[in-house]
Every structure is written in structure tokens, then in C-alpha cells.
Image (tube, rainbow, N blue to C red):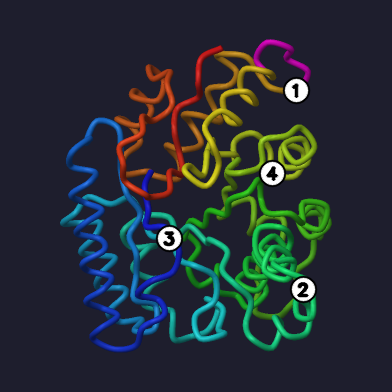
Amino acid sequence: MLSTSGPGADLVDGAEGVAIAREMNDVLAEAIARHPDRFQGFAHLPMREPEAAAEELVRSVKTLGFRGALINGMTNDRFLDDGRFEPILAAAQDLDVPIYLHPHLAPQVLRELYYSNLPGTAGYVLEAAGWGWHRKRPSHVLRLVLAGTLDRHPRLKLIIGHMGEGCRPCWRAAIRSRRPMSSTSSRPISRTILEQVWITTSGMFSQPPFLAALLTFGIDRILFSVDYPMLPMKAVVLFSTRWRWRRPIWPSSPTATPIVCSSSARVHASAAPRLNDRLARAGTAPRRTGHPRRVHYVSAPKS
């Protein structure tokens, strides 16, 4: 699954942002068309124009054949539980495609409070992949639960990467909460998250986060993902082959099939038959194609 890397149209207002998103999606579709047997795509949306973003999502799915959308964090310091984003969520639900919630940089007020006055690039590293990204994403999802947003869209599918982000112990505490925490949430947090949220292995290829994710979400909610080219494929192959050979926690084939195949098919329901068949047969990581775009899901490398 390919997507555009980093922010773009989501930082631009009005017609210009809409045009940028449309062009980026068209370029991505052209790249996918050169390798249609290997790649599919996530749409890039002009988030500052929610009605137009919903229309672009529909176009990207129905015309370009994309399988969902990737959204970079907050938009104008607003989470997706803000009512102005309802058209986007409704469109994703109606299309039966997932929304991938990807991290983004912190709002200015948080940047100054938590990440300023540090030497060199330490502040940026702390704000981004080193720490901050993994703190904000669980909060975003929990807001969608507690605000009743996921109750209003009970068939909406969310994906979060980086092994459920870096707050897996907190995720577990939240999931184990059996009673609704607000009057707008009709289901327990545990039921809501485990019915509507999937996580990926992207960028977190070590045993502790995988164990925590497995114990928190269960194997049926974990999607195999690599985060290429942000992470070298060598780390992915080493992780997969290590656990397949030694087998302390990593299930061997065919038990491993749910991570690679069944979970992906449930998230991308419209592509389930072809995805199940193709991923079950595949055994290599994606080749370098020269396109600087993020890879989210690939087949598991053979040991």
C-alpha cells in the first residue's frame, strides 16, 4: 500500500489545497499503474476543506482504485472528532475503506512547551519519531471514542501504525476499561477500539513492542507493515526471519497467515478476495522502484 510521504495539501487552504491533493493522487495512481500487481494506494486529502476532501476520497476510491486515505495528525490544531470533519468520516464509512491516522508535528503551543530549548536537533527528534508522535496518536483515537465519533460511524475503520504507537501500556489500560467514560460513548472503550481499530507493525521491528501489541490487540488486529523507505528493508527481513526461525513469539506458517493475510482482508474489505490470494502466495518484499512513497503493507518475507 503506497501513500504520499509527509504533509502537503493538508497545509493549504481553499482551491489550491484541493488542486494539490488531486494532482498528488493522480501522480500516485500513475506510479501504481506501472506495477498494478504489486501496489495499491491511500488517498491524500485536502483536509482544510472537508467537503472537498470527502469528494476527493470518493474520486480516489471509485476512479483511481485507491483503498482508503492517509491523514497526517491534526488539521489546524483540530482532531477528527471536530464536527467539520464529519463528511470525510461518513464518506470513508460509506465506501467501506479505512483511514490511516499518521503522526504529524505538534501544534506550536505544545512545541514550545515540551520540545523547545534543547540542543541541536534534539527538540525535533523528541517531537517527532523519537517520542511525540507516539504520544499523540493514542490520544487522537481515544478522543474519537469518547466524543462518540466512532459510535456515529460504527463501520468506520481506523489504522494506526508503529505497533499501535508508543503508548501500548496505556492502550491496554484504556481497552480494559469496561464502562463508557462519557455520555456520548455508548460502548465500552475496549469494545469500540477492538471493533474499529487496527494497528500495523511499521517501524517497530523489535520484540517488546510486538509482544505488547499482541497482548493488547490480539493477532487479528495486527497488519504487517514496513514503513519503507523510512525504514530499511533489511530490518524488516531480519525481524521476520528471526522470529520464524527461533519461534519464541512469532507464529510460523500457516499460523502467521492472520497477520499477513486475514487482517488485511478485513480492513480492505473491497479487496479481500484478491488480497487474500495474492498475499498468501507472495514471499518477497517490494522492489525499489524509484518512487519516494511510503509502503505500508507488504507480504511477509520467507525465511
Res 9 quadrant in image = bottom left
Residue at mark 2 to residue at mark 1: CA–CA distance: 34 Å
Nearest to viewer (mark 1 / mark 4): 1
- Assign a secondary structure to mark 1: loop
Check residue 217 in the rendering and tell me which mark sits there, or answer none. Answer: 4
Location of mark 2 (residue): 181
- Magenta segment range? 244-249
Instruction: Name above or below for residue 87 compared with residue 101.
Output: below
Within 10 Å of the Cα at label 4, are there few (<14), some (14-19), or many (20+) other Cα atoms? many
Location of mark 3 (residue): 70
Residue placed at 65% from the left, 58% from the top?
Answer: 129
Residue placed at 78% from the left, 71% from the top?
Answer: 119
Check residue 249 in the rendering and tell me which mark sits there, or answer none. Answer: 1
Kind of residue at disc 2: Met
Residue at mark 3 to residue at mark 2: CA–CA distance: 28 Å
Residue at mark 3 to residue at mark 4: CA–CA distance: 21 Å
Pick whichever of labels 3 and 2 is earlier in the sequence.
Answer: 3
Nearest to viewer (mark 3 / mark 4): 3
* Left or right of 105, for residue 23: left
Please provide percent x and percent y for residue 289: 30, 37
Residue 141 is one of the magenta-drawn residues: no
